[in-house]
Amino acid sequence: MTKNIKTLSGELPVIGHAHKGLGDPIKLWKFVKELNAETNQAGGLTKGWLGPLFYVSVSDPEMALTLSNACLAKNYMYKFASSWLGQGLITAEVPTWRQHRRLLCSAFNPSVLDGFVEVFNRQSERLTDALVREAGRGEFDHWPHFSENALQTICQEDEFPR
């Protein structure tokens, strides 16, 4: 079924494309960007291997929608995440996902999200301002900035007392 899908470049025997992203977060990020660019150039769909695991990369929105409607089952790797994420949106099994999908789709409707653009922009600017103050000072703990920003965004609060 996938013989006509372009294979990503750099595949090696046995490990496939795993070597391109293993090592450190920077190497992984470069691989993800390369994967995305190559998938875009191939028309929005490519295939590859991470060791014995076959995967497809989709960057075309229409194709992604078609696939997401047809492929609700998640890879077994999601079971590992469920131990620390619990059973939620990302880790839900197909019966749970099917049952709640319509509710989620209406909540993420573009017309609903458009109402939050001002909040997202304001909070993005606040987070950027906080991170700019840290720039050039060496390593720092990003968590306080991100957690405060997330709470402000979720609650749509202008300021939280410290």
Image (cartoon, rainbow, N blue to C red):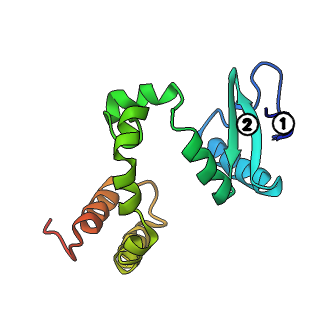
Q: Give the camera-side residue of 37 and 107.
A: 107
The reply to whether the C-beta atoms of the residues labelled 1 and 2 are less than 8 Å apart is yes
Residue on which disc 2 sits: 20
Residue 90, relative to residue 54: is it above or below? below
**Label 1 to label 2, Cα distance in Å?**
8 Å
Which quadrant would residue 5 be assigned to in this image?
A: top right
Q: Position of residue 136 (x, y in %)?
A: 49, 66
Q: Type of residue at label 2? A: Lys
Q: Which mark is residue 10?
A: 1
Q: Residue at x 58, y 41 (%)?
A: 70
In the displayed orientation, state which residue is furthest to the left. 161
Q: Helix, strand, or loop for circle 2?
A: helix
Q: Is 147 placed left or right of 66 in the picture?
A: left
Q: Give the camera-side residue of 53 and 157.
A: 53
Q: Type of residue at label 1? A: Gly
Asked whether the viewer can see residue 141, the reply is: no
Q: Is 94 placed left or right of 11 in the picture?
A: left
